[in-house]
Image: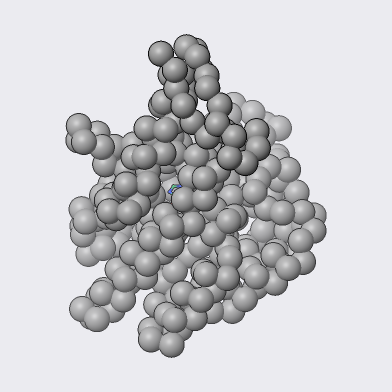
Amino acid sequence: GVALFNAKKRGRNQIHWYHTGYEDQAIRRLNKEQILRNAIQDQDLAIHGQPRIDCRTGQIEALECLVRIPLEDGQLMFPGNFIELAEQNGLIRELDAYMLEQALNQISDWLSQGIEPLPLAINLSLQSFNTTLLDSLNQWQVRHPEVFQYLELELTEHRLPDHDEAFLEHLKSIRDFGIRLALDDFGTGYANLSRLPDWPFQILKLDRSFILDLPESDKQQAVVKSIIDLCSTLGIQVVAEGVETEAELTIVDQLGCHCIQGYVYARPKPLEDTGDWLSARRISAQ
Ligand code: C2E
Ligand code: MG
Ligand code: MG
Ligand code: MG
């Protein structure tokens, strides 16, 4: 059999035929792209929330919103499986815009019900930091400026452009709305500490790769300690991501990072099931 698809990278409007071997891959990619496209078009996306906790008080500080695609068989497709594709074909902009609207609607609903909102964090791909984002923030600004103090936007460190003044200004104008900015997955890129003072991030999320060998490695502890100390000097809050065990929790806490997100407290669960977190606002490690 043969698979037909439009190989964009090889030139516009060229049709390429690939035979067995490439075929499976191409069909799988096409299928995935179709699933993704339909899910976004039908707004059939599931949003799971995972809390960020102050480990000294058990206080829930925020809920990170994580997208999933519900499949016909009842299973969920996870972002590790489709974000990259969505970034390649541009669908990520619609996906991220949808997540942002959902989060802001949720915050606004809570406010109108007289409920103090849990701050919600949304992940945005680099492409989503565009003028459309600014436009929709401006619209919210006119109608409900009070939502912004409960919104956080996360941007992955390894995607940060180098020395891009325009982008920096863009980030600053987002911060000027009163939205908090988080540098996500810190340590997966260059972990360039010297640039940290230039960026308008209030939150830095240490990637799980830092946390993994922490209990065993003195060197890694020294590295993490210096990041935590620098951030404290700069007034940036550090979050340890992907904390799974009591041992990891203990060491991160000892190093001076009290803000934790990870399975040790809670796995992500559907946003509509997070009512207990909203009402309790407190949680203890398992
Ligand atoms: P992230 O923003 O770093 O989110 C944290 C990821 O770590 C989530 O994976 C979460 O389920 C997982 N995690 C949390 N605690 C633990 C733990 O203790 N151990 C381990 N091993 N993992 C833990 P998830 O939901 O699969 O998302 C993966 C990535 O996909 C996210 O990483 C984020 O970069 C991206 N993503 C998710 N939703 C969106 C979205 O709406 N838009 C965009 N652009 N990216 C998204
Ligand atoms: Mg994130
Ligand atoms: Mg992360
Ligand atoms: Mg990650």
Foreground residue among 88 and 153 = 88
* Residue 123 placement (x, y as % from top left): 48, 55
Pick the front one: 183 or 87: 87
**Residue 229 in sight here:** no
x%, y% of residue 129? 58, 63
* Relative horizontal placement of residue 10, taking residue 66 as reference (left or right): right
Which residue is pictured at 52% across the width and 34% down the height?
Answer: 6
- The quadrant holding residue 139 is bottom left
Q: Can I make out residue 34 in this image?
A: yes
Q: Which of the image's four quarters has the N terminus?
A: top left
Q: Say whether residue 196 is left or right of residue 213.
A: right
Residue ID at (63%, 68%) = 171
In-front residue for pair 71/27: 27
Q: Identify the residue at the far bottom of this view.
A: 142
Give coordinates of residue 44: x percent, y percent: 27, 51
Q: Is residue 266 above or below residue 122?
A: above
Residue for point 52% across, 19% down: 18
